[in-house]
Structures are given as structure tokens and as C-alpha cells.
Image: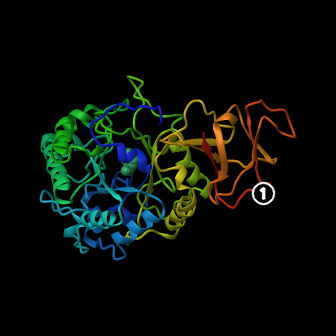
Amino acid sequence: MSSYVTKKTQGDTAWFTRDRFGMFIHFGLYSMAARHEWFKTNEKVPETKYDVYFDLFDPDLFDAKEWARRAKAAGMKYAVLTAKHHEGFCLFDSRYTDYKSTNTPFGRDIVKEYAEAFRAEGLRVGLYYSLIDWHHPQFPIDHLHPRRDDADAKEQNEKRDMRVYAQYMRDQVRELLTNYGKIDILWFDFSYSHTPEGVPDYLRGKGKDDWEAEKLIETARSIQPDIVIDNRTEIDQDIWTPEQYQPEDWVRHPETGELVVWETCQTFSGSWGYYRDEMTWKSPEILIRLLVDTVSKGGNLLMNVGPTGRGNFDKRAENALRVYEEWMRLNSRSIYACTKAEPEFVSPRDCRLTQSADGKKLYVHLFSYPSFPFFVMQGIADKVRYAQFLHDGSELLFTAGKCPWFDVGLNDLVLSVPPVKPDVVVPVIELFLK
Ligand code: GLC
């Protein structure tokens, strides 16, 4: 059994830390503009101009079943869809706003179709809900808001009441957790209460008090007590969420130092919403390494797809998903129900270790392939019963403490490896422990 113990929280994270790999989906009106989900504020687009996306929203290729099939094929076990992003547009039929997909030419409740399709594929269903709202008339203008440079921004704010908006969020969260069956994850985004220097007070950032985060979380838990909630309301909940970077090691609670349940979210190409002209797509090696590196530190990976304005995954996203599909088909045993290896196992250079939670198997992921026919792991020969490549189950012969080419320690495990790297993006050695 793994000896790592994480901070206790209220939500059910047992399934979450077994499943390890999920799909983030950023979809909204911004998908049509195809230049980042923040473009409304980046370009300070006025409401009247942004209306064109709402008026024309009709993702004719949207097929939730197809999304779900692709997620499942890639080895993902859960998903998190933007029910509402910062632009304020709702992908669900909310009673509390007209600004929703059911009022566009498309006319459909996307959250509903998503939840049903993903559940039908046996995937867990999560929803992202933006705390920020650049459409809601009561959401005060702040330094991130598209209207921040309006000459009368201060006066506009005098007519806006954050408490009305906080109530709106509670109402919508109640809808989302009541009308769509069991929701496994609620992913709030995000707090920014540290206002940068030089920003006038009337444009200050927002945090847990503004969201009335305690009440918001209470509302969610009163409907679905086990739901997994992230920490971005600024109140610690079940998961910690480093974004677009890999932590050095298992994430710890900043104050108590306890290990926490964590999930890094990453993109294929830098942006979350579909971005036509972005060229920084990650290579297959990087995609697989991100997943392996995450699990080797006891975390989860939430990998993002930004469907196009027509609602499908573009070629580049499909290709990236196929990289996961191919690798996971043969190697997922080193990912599911695996975690950071016990401290007695030290990773050789350019490798990442994971260990099955029952402690019986150790997985060595070769980020660079050995340049000579031996691969040495120090001080563990007496613990290993059998060794094989994971992708094809082919035996890897080994000796304890004997290497014809150089001196090794008595208890070093010396594996003979083929001279040519197997045709696998990241080969994995599976060690059966005694
Ligand atoms: C951010 C961004 C956002 C994205 C999210 C994903 O904080 O505002 O656009 O949805 O992170 O983690």
C-alpha cells in the first residue's frame, strides 16, 4: 500500500486519484472568434459587438457522443466542460439568464447533451463555472473587465451590485447540480484578490468575499455533498490546481505542508479556447511526458481541448488525442491507480517512476532511451521478482550486481535492454516487486 497520505477533505477524491486523467473542454462564443477565450477583454470588445457571436452561434458539428468517444479512446476517465466561462455565456438552459445556448440559433442545452453522452461512455462528469462574468450587468467592472478603460467605469460600477451577482451564481450552481444528474466535479475559476499596483480602488480584483464563496460552496454541498470542488474560490476544498506548469513534486498545502490532492491543467497549444492561428502545439513526447510526470508526483492531469466554433475537434486536437490513445492503449497500467513511487525507489536519471497503489508494481518511464545495452537501478535488486516492457509484455533479463561493462553495487538491478528503442513514445519497464 502507498504510504502517502493527503489532507482530508469533504469531497470524494478516491475515484479521482485512481482515474488520474481527464479532459478539459473550453467551449463558448469565443470558439467562433478563434483567438483565445479572453479576447473579449484582451480587445475590450463592447457588448454590442460581441452580440454577433450570440446571434450566430450554431455549432452544427457539435456531437457530445463524439467528444465522449474521443475522450474515452484517449484513456481519459472524466471530463470538465465550461458551463459558463468568463464571457458569461451559458451552455445550459438557465432560468436566471437569457444569455444561454438555448436562445441562440443552435437552441440546444449543451451541458445536458454533454452530461448524458459522457456518462453513457462510463466517464465521470465535471463542470467548470466561471466566477468572473463579463456579461452580467451586476458584475462590477474590475481591472480584468472589458469595460475597464471606459471613462465612466466608476459611475457604471455605482449601479452594479456584487451581491446580486453572487446570488445569481448560487442560483445557477443550484440549477447545474439539480438538473443534470450526478456531477462529479465542480471547477470554479478564479480569484484575483491581489490587485496589481497602480490599479485604482474601483477596479480592484475579486476574491472569496466577493463571491460569497462560503455560501456558494455550501449551496453546492447541500445538493451533492461528495462532489469534488477545486480551490479557486480562494477557499481550500478538495483539489489544488496548478495551471500550465508542472510542480517540482507532490503539491503541499502552503500553510500546513500536508500533501494535497492535486490536478494540473494543461493545453495542447497554449490557449484554452479554440485558437486558429496558434502554432505552439506540443509534441507527442511532451504530451505523454506531462501525463507521466504528473502521476509520478501523485497528481492528475486535466488536458484541454478547445472545440472549434462548429463544435468539433480540429485535426490538430484529434492528432494530439490520438497520441494519448495509442500510448494509453498499451501503457495505461502505469497510470491508473498508480501514484508516486515509495521513497525507497530512487528514479534513475531521465526517468519517471510510478507505483501501483497496492505497492506491487513499479513502473520506470524512459524519457531518454539508454545508449548502452544495460539499464541500472541502484539498490533494488533484492526487491524485484520479474521485469518486462509494459507495451508488449516482453521479458527483460536482469542480474543483481553484475554488469560486464562497468562496476555496479551488489544490490543494483542491471537490466538488459534492446539496443533499439521500441516504437513507443515513452517506453515503460514494469517491475514486479517481491
Ligand atoms: C484561467 C483562465 C482561463 C482558463 C483557466 C483554466 O484562469 O482565465 O481562461 O479557463 O484558467 O485553468
Q: Could you tell whether 257 is left or right of 140 in the image? A: right
Where is residue 299? Give x, y as percent. Answer: 46, 42
What residue is drawn where x is 41% and y is 71%?
A: 312
Q: Determine which quarter of the picture holds residue 81.
A: bottom left
User: What is the three-letter code of the residue carrying label 1?
Assistant: Val
Nearest to the observer: residue 241 or residue 153: 241
Can see residue 160? no
The residue that mark 1 highlights is 420
Colouring mode (rainbow / by chain / secondary structure / one colour) = rainbow
Image quadrant in which the C terminus is located? top right
Return the residue found at the far right: 405
Where is residue 204? Give x, y as percent. Answer: 28, 34
Where is residue 335? Give x, y as percent. Answer: 51, 50
Where is residue 257? Give x, y as percent. Answer: 42, 24
What residue is drawn where x is 24% and y is 59%?
A: 90
Callout 1: CB less than 8 Å from ligand 1: no
Q: Give the crowd class for mark 1: few <14, some 14-19, many >=20 residues within 10 Å.
A: few
